[in-house]
Image (cartoon, rainbow, N blue to C red):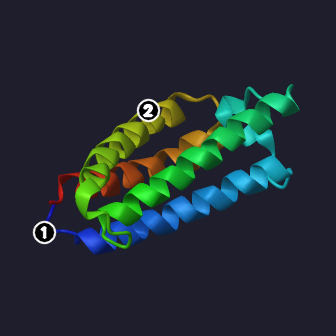
Amino acid sequence: MKKTIGTKTAGNILLTALSALLVFHILVISGFVPSDSIWGGQINESQSKLRILETISIIITAVFIVIVLVKIDYIRLRRFHWIGRAGMWIICIYFLFNTVTNFSSGVSAENLFFGPITIVLTLLALRLAIAH
């Protein structure tokens, strides 16, 4: 996999996707994206629960962005370079789990749209995780 796509390229694609995901979560919390297309369609009844879960998603996505920035050296933390390596494995596992839940969801948007996207994100995260 290392010869297929470079570390910087994988990181830049992942940063772009994570930034788009951040915007998506902001649109959901703002009400511009219907809540029945996310979280397995199970949050329609509670706006406060939606706000809490989406706020957590925004925070996680922002942390993932910082980890990718550290891993591809846009943020240099010489003494804490292990944050990028360990963080990328956590991100990879997170996206792998998210892929399984997207495909097992009863919501067609998650099955058809978000599932394939999370496969790509998982592979990009794996590419960065195995990089030195």
Element carrying mark 1: loop
Which residue is rendered at x = 46% and y = 59% of the image?
66
Which residue is rendered at x = 59% and y = 41% of the image?
110
Whole-angstrom CA distance, mark 1 to mark 2, is 27 Å
Front position in the image: 10 or 84: 84
Name the quadrant of the N terminus: bottom left
> Does residue 59 sit above or below 6 in this rendering?
above
Which picture quadrant has residue 97? top left
Name the quadrant of the C terminus: bottom left
Task: Identify the residue under disc 2.
Answer: 100
> Does residue 52 sit above or below 8 in this rendering?
above
Which picture quadrant has residue 124? bottom left
Task: Identify the residue under disc 1.
Answer: 3
Query: Mark 1 belongs to which amino acid?
Result: Lys
Q: Is residue 22 left or right of residue 73?
A: right
> Does residue 80 sit above or below 108 in this rendering?
below
Query: How far across and down, in percent of the image, does residue 119 sit?
Result: 39, 48
> Does residue 54 sit above or below 25 in this rendering?
above
Which residue is rendered at x = 18% and y = 59% of the image?
131
